[in-house]
Image (spheres, rainbow, N blue to C red):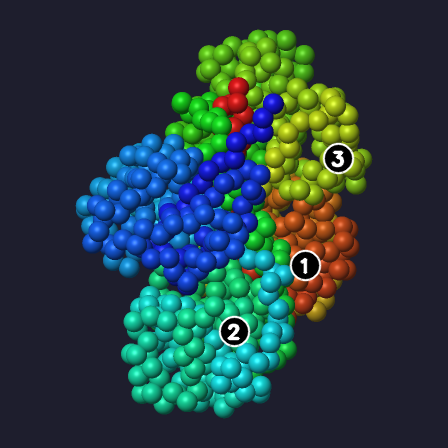
């Protein structure tokens, strides 16, 4: 027997000069698992300063030394190089590489092509010739890798690239390489004093980086704080003009132009505050990531993917582009408070360690490269997926799957819905989304016609995969049975709850756990949910209870943040005054949601905040009981029961805080929707909420059933509007990074293509 051959991956770039995208390439190729990958690098032009690092890590590299005017000669050289090295995949970065590289890959018969995009827009609109070329070359392009979710509208809407080919892989750094203390001699070498407060920017001196705004802000900061000095790291043709601008602004003696540096880590450690002032196309800047790893707070313009990295009011400040005053205000605030600088810097370092490590980034890149260039499991037509439910009740799972169906790429997945009993209240919304709905009319528990009808439906629709959810008990058993009888290749079970041992229940019945081997995959919402099912319910404990487990978090459509007008409209609709503190809950009126705990907490809050209001959105069997409890607690008109609302996002801006008092949960959609609206959360610490919310960063988690703790957090937030704003912005950033609807849809698509293709 022989070991599988390593995947040969050739990275084609313009050059390897100092720059974020270039550092990304050299760092990635040096870390690829050599037992699986055989990387190489081709520079179309000169080698660049980073080129020697390839040899240090044993990565073959070659430079063709061609200019833009030598396109034909460059193409020929590139074809010869590819024919000699015979890669399985070429990865292209930079416009010249994207064009010439794809043509060369076709001529050299390279099987797979990836374009790795590092920008969020174009400085100049693309002409018709280039757009036509991009359209033609898309046919030979397997995938487009990006580094920030902010790129998706640009890639899909502006460039018209197929959404199912786009994959986002965040950049990463190794935190162990960055020392917050640094070398004191670095400041001395740069001409800085120990007691200077150093504001630094690391960026090539190009127009889009907008160093002019940085210098104008520096002049305002210099006038406000005599200790401030400014460090410009980077080089380019714009340097003479910027040096002249510093003289004109009267701060030439306060600004150090350090040029391009190979010791960026040491220079970052010499700064007190980091800045990026770009006005456009900034994507997922490595310089900011490295500054965060160095425990440095940052003040950056809110462009491109920067808001996915920097949490406003937590790790630094986000400001509008081309606004020197706003940039200066953020800098002055940080320079004036050593406590804030240390706290923000520590939070920045923690965010890198939690979400943006090089290890995670490389693992994701390896997985995506293997998907592109590994053994093909592609299907020649869309995967036909049937979601089998008892009926489409109004609940988190039903609403989620409706939205996921809408977000599916029709070229990848073609969904349908089968309701065993009645259509349910959401059936028409599924139909409006273009989803075909079959209703089998099951009359009761012992209706023996259900399975034959379901088998015929699955066969008629030539279904490739059946998906059932844990809480639709009839479909959990009948859907899997009918799928086996109809010879459907793939069956999936989605679990959307946990912590049911708290109330004497189970997520998966024992018989379902004992037959998991007959299921192709168990879809989970969070890693902690898998741990719970293994620990409490025996999943994976025996051979017959094991199956593939895949984490696909819930997601929502991320709309623009509500503004003051949206807040005023929402409060007017609910009849709420504009100047009172409003807490809200969106949840079924069921025992699981434990509304009585929230009402008790609100009664405590009203003793100090008599004008506060509580909005209860949702319907259910407990409505009269909860209304009676509110009256008994003397809350009167302080509590508004709205019943079921079908346009919850329109009224969420009325909330100052969103609450959840449940005794068990999975990854609740209502919490994600509130976070997406920039609303801080106060919730009980159950289910996967700890995976969603970092206590004190996106809101607060309190013990289950603890009304006093819940009231304490509500009181804290009612007294501090700035705290609410900071937590709300961090919550929004969390959703943008982890809980987007398109991420959920892409997760299901990848799983279905992999499973169905392997059959």
Of circles 1 and 2, the one toward us is 2
Point out the tag, 1 or 2, that comes first from the N-terminus.
2
- Residue at figure coordinates x 37%, y 71% from the top left: 235
- Residue at figure coordinates x 30%, y 73% from the top left: 238
Crowding near pointer 2: few (<14 within 10 Å), some, many (20+)?
many
The answer to whether marks 3 and 2 mark residues whose Cβ atoms lie closer than 8 Å is no
Q: Which residue is identified by label 1?
A: 695
Q: Is residue 616 left or right of residue 133?
A: right
Q: Secondary structure at mark 2?
A: helix
Report, in whole angstroms, how far the alpha carbon at label 1 lies from the one at label 2: 33 Å
Q: Which residue is identified by label 3?
A: 534
Where is residue 527, by image quadrant?
Answer: top right
Report, in whole angstroms, how far the alpha carbon at label 3 lies from the one at label 2: 47 Å
Between 457 and 279, the residue placed more toward the observer is 279
Q: Which of the image's four quarters has the N terminus?
A: top right
Q: Is residue 710 left or right of residue 57?
A: right
Where is residue 123, by image quadrant?
Answer: bottom left
Between 243 and 538, the residue placed more toward the observer is 243
- Residue 267: give its label: 2
Report, in whole angstroms, how far the alpha carbon at label 1 lies from the one at label 3: 26 Å
Point out the tag, 3 or 2, that comes first from the N-terminus.
2
Q: Is residue 288 left or right of residue 475?
A: left
Residue 649 percent coordinates (x, y): 49, 49
Between 321 and 192, the residue placed more toward the observer is 192
Crowding near pointer 3: few (<14 within 10 Å), some, many (20+)?
some
Q: Secondary structure at mark 1?
A: loop
Residue 81 percent coordinates (x, y): 34, 41
Where is residue 512, by image quadrant?
Answer: top right
The image shows residue 608, relative to residue 72, as above or below, that is below
State whether residue 700 appears in this view: no
- Residue at figure coordinates x 31%, y 87% from the top left: 248
The image shows residue 517, relative to residue 425, as above or below, that is above
């Amino acid at each position: 027997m022989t070991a599988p051959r390593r995947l040969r991956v050739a990275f084609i770039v313009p050059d390897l000069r100092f720059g974020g995208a270039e550092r990304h390439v050299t760092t990635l190729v040096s870390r690829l698992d050599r037992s699986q990958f055989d990387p190489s690098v081709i520079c179309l032009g000169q080698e660049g300063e980073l080129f020697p690092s390839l040899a240090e890590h044993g990565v073959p590299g070659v430079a063709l030394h061609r200019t833009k005017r030598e396109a034909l000669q460059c193409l020929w050289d590139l074809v010869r190089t590819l024919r000699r090295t015979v890669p399985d995949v070429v990865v292209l970065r930079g416009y010249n590489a994207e064009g010439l590289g794809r043509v060369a890959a076709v001529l050299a018969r390279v099987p797979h092509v990836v374009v790795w995009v590092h920008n969020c827009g174009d400085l100049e609109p693309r002409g018709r010739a280039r757009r036509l070329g991009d359209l033609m070359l898309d046919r030979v392009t397997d995938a487009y890798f990006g580094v920030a979710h902010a790129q998706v509208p640009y890639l899909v809407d502006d460039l018209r690239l197929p959404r199912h080919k786009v994959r986002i892989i965040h950049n990463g750094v190794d935190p162990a390489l960055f020392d917050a203390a640094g070398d004191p001699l670095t400041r001395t070498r740069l001409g800085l004093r120990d007691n200077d407060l150093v504001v630094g920017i690391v960026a090539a001196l190009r127009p889009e980086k907008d160093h002019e705004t940085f210098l104008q802000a520096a002049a305002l900061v210099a006038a406000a704080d005599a200790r401030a000095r400014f460090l410009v790291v980077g080089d380019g043709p714009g340097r003479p003009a910027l040096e002249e601008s510093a003289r004109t602004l009267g701060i030439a003696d306060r600004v150090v132009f350090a040029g391009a540096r190979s010791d960026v880590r040491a220079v970052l450690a010499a700064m007190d505050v980091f800045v990026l002032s770009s006005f456009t196309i900034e994507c997922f800047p490595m310089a900011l990531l490295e500054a965060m790893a160095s425990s440095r707070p940052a003040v950056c313009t809110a462009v491109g993917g920067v808001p996915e990295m920097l949490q406003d009011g937590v790790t630094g400040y986000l400001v509008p582009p081309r606004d020197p005053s706003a940039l200066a205000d953020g800098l002055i605030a940080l320079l004036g408070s050593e406590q804030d600088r240390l706290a923000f810097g520590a939070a920045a370092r923690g965010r890198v360690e939690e979400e943006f490590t090089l290890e995670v980034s490389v693992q994701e890149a390896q997985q995506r490269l293997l998907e592109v260039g590994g053994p093909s499991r592609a299907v020649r037509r869309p995967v036909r997926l049937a979601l089998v439910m008892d009926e489409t009740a109004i609940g988190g799972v039903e609403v989620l799957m409706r939205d996921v169906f809408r977000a599916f790429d029709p070229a990848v997945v073609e969904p349908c819905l089968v309701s065993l009993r009645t259509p349910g209240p959401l059936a028409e919304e599924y139909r409006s989304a273009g989803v075909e709905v079959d209703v089998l009319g099951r009359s009761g528990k012992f209706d023996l016609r259900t399975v034959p009808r379901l088998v015929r439906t699955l066969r008629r629709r030539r279904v490739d995969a059946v998906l059932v959810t844990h809480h639709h008990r009839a479909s959990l058993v009948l859907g899997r049975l009918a799928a086996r009888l109809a010879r459907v290749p793939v069956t999936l079970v989605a679990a959307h709850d946990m912590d049911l041992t708290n109330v004497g229940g189970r997520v998966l019945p024992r018989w379902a756990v004992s037959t998991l081997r007959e299921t192709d995959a168990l879809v989970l919402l969070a890693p902690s949910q898998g741990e719970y099912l293994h620990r409490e319910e025996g999943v994976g404990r025996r051979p017959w209870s094991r199956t593939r487990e895949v984490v696909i978090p819930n997601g929502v459509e991320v709309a623009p943040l509500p503004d003051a007008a949206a807040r005023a409209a929402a409060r007017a609709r609910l009849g709420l005054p504009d100047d009172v503190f409003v807490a809200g809950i969106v949840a079924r009126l069921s025992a699981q949601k434990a509304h009585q705990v929230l009402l008790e907490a609100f009664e405590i809050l009203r003793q100090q905040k008599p004008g506060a209001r509580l909005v209860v959105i949702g319907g259910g069997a407990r409505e009269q009981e909860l209304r009676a409890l509110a009256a008994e607690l003397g809350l009167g008109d302080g509590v508004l029961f709205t019943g079921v609302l079908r346009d919850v996002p329109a009224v969420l801006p009325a909330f100052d805080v969103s609450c959840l008092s449940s005794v068990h949960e999975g990854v609740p959609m209502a919490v994600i929707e509130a976070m997406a609206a920039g609303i801080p959360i106060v919730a009980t610490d159950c289910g996967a909420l700890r995976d969603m919310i970092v206590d004190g960063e996106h809101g607060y988690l309190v013990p289950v059933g603890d009304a006093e703790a819940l009231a304490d957090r509500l009181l804290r937030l009612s007294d501090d509007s700035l705290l609410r704003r900071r937590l709300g912005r961090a919550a929004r950033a969390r959703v943008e990074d982890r809980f987007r609807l398109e991420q959920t849809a892409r997760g299901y698509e990848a799983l279905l293509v992999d499973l169905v293709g392997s059959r």
